[in-house]
Amino acid sequence: LGDEVFFVGFPFGMGAEDILQPVVRSGSIAWLPQNGKEYLLDAFSYGGNSGSPIFRKMILGTKLGNLDWEKPKLIGMIVGHQNIHVENVLTQPDPTILKFEKGNLDINLGLARCVFMDDIIILANKVSEK
């Protein structure tokens, strides 16, 4: 809980042109379940981040005052993000026209839903046994 992480992906299709250049995002582990399969990152994820690998940042000091990066550790995968659905919100679809409409919004709360790497390995082993 609280560990810094980073993940790579293609939110909104960005970086998925002829030459693949994924977008790198960072965050921290915000919530760990006691008995669940998913955990939460304090990080914005969007469409295109599903399936993104998550790596834990490892900083270790070899001696006092000298910090070095250790190899990142793969800890999981993003499967979505937490939304809140808000109904009957006034919106202004075209900012150049003073006209408002009532509609519904899904607001991204900035919490990415993730699965543990161990669970992915277990599932992959079950599939390969068939």
Image: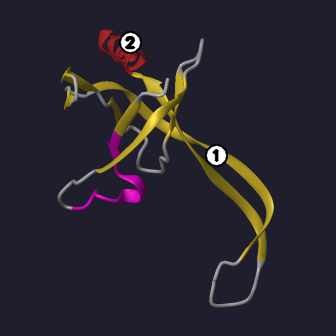
Image quarter (top left, top right, bottom left or bottom right) of the C terminus = top left
Indicate which disc, 2 or 1, sits on the residue closer to the N terminus: 1
Q: Which residues are magenta?
A: 7-17
**Label 1 neighbour load within 10 Å: few <14, some 14-19, many 20+:** some
Residue 74 at x, y = what percent? 30, 26
Give the number of callouts: 2
- What amino acid type is highlighted by mark number 1? Asn
**Left or right of 58: which side holds 27?**
right
**Label 2 neighbour load within 10 Å: few <14, some 14-19, many 20+:** few
Task: Please tell me which residue is depicted at 75% across the width and 86% down the height of the picture.
Answer: 99
Which of the numbered marks, if any, corresponds to residue 122? 2
**Left or right of 1: which side holds 70?**
left
Element marked by disc 2: helix
Q: CA distance from mark 2 to mark 1?
A: 28 Å
- What amino acid type is highlighted by mark number 2? Ile
Quarter of image, res 4: top left
Residue 5 at x, y = what percent? 37, 34
Residue 22 at x, y = what percent? 27, 51
Q: Residue furthest front?
A: 64
Which of the numbered marks, if any, corresponds to residue 83? 1
Q: Nearer the viewer, mark 2 or mark 1?
A: 1
Which of the numbered marks, if any, corresponds to residue 5? none
Quarter of image, res 71: top left
Task: Please tell me which residue is depicted at 34% across the width and 18% down the height of the picture.
Answer: 124
| Position of 91 relative to 67 (above/below) | below
Residue 128 at x, y = what percent? 30, 14
Task: Please tell me which residue is depicted at 66% across the width and 78% down the height of the picture.
Answer: 93
